[in-house]
Amino acid sequence: MHLTDINKLIDFAIEQEHEAFAFYKAASEKVSNPGVKQLFLELAEDEHGHANLLEIYRENKELGKIFKTAVIDYKISEIHEMPTLSLTMIPSEAIAIAMKKEQQAAELYAAFAANATTSEVKEALENLMNMELGHKHKLENAFVDIGYPEVF
């Protein structure tokens, strides 16, 4: 993707948010743990909301400022492998999948931002990265709060 067209970038981001929504909806249907199911449903709604915000942003670039957030990154997902999504997965595996997907999305936007050709595109990409890091943070908090996989 050539990183000079902000509208193409926003279209790409909207597509990514729709894919994330579909993933979290599907994942919520595959887990039996009620807490993890609820977390995935909340993340699906977040992704749906992000897609809606991005559609508004496409029309009014001033709304880009709402994406700025300060996020603490525990880097927990970086030390765990991504398991395969299945009907038999345990809660720690479900959360590990979601953490990895958010990590990958944040890394993608960070790489795009590093190669952005305009400050407008770079700022939009960094804002998208922060949205994904926000989800990663939420998942890592859930992972830590539950007490690591040994507790499950």
Image (cartoon, helix red, strand yellow):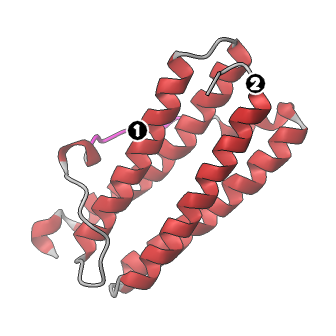
Give the percent coordinates (x, y) of residue 88: 24, 84
Image coords of residue 42 (percent x, y): 55, 70
Residues in magenta? 69-75
Mark 1 lies on residue:
72
Residue type for callout 1:
Ile
What main secondary structure does the magenta stretch of the protein show? loop
Residue drawn at 73 percent across, 43 percent down: 11
Instruction: Compute the Cα span from label 1 to label 2.
Output: 30 Å
Up-down relation of residue 109 to residue 12 (above or below): above
Q: In which quarter of the image is the C terminus?
A: bottom left
Residue located 22% across and 77% down the image: 90
- Kindly state the secondary structure of the residue where label 1 is placed: loop
Give the image location of residue 51, x and y in percent. 71, 54
Name the outermost residue toward the front: 1
The residue shown at (38%, 79%) is: 35
**Residue extending furthest left?**
150
Spot occupied by residue 55 in the image (x, y as percentages of width and height): 81, 49
- For the residue marked with disc 2, what is the amino acid? Asp
Give the residue pinned by disc 2: 5
Q: Who is closer to the viewer here, 135 or 30?
A: 30
Residue positioned 75% across, 46% down in the render: 54
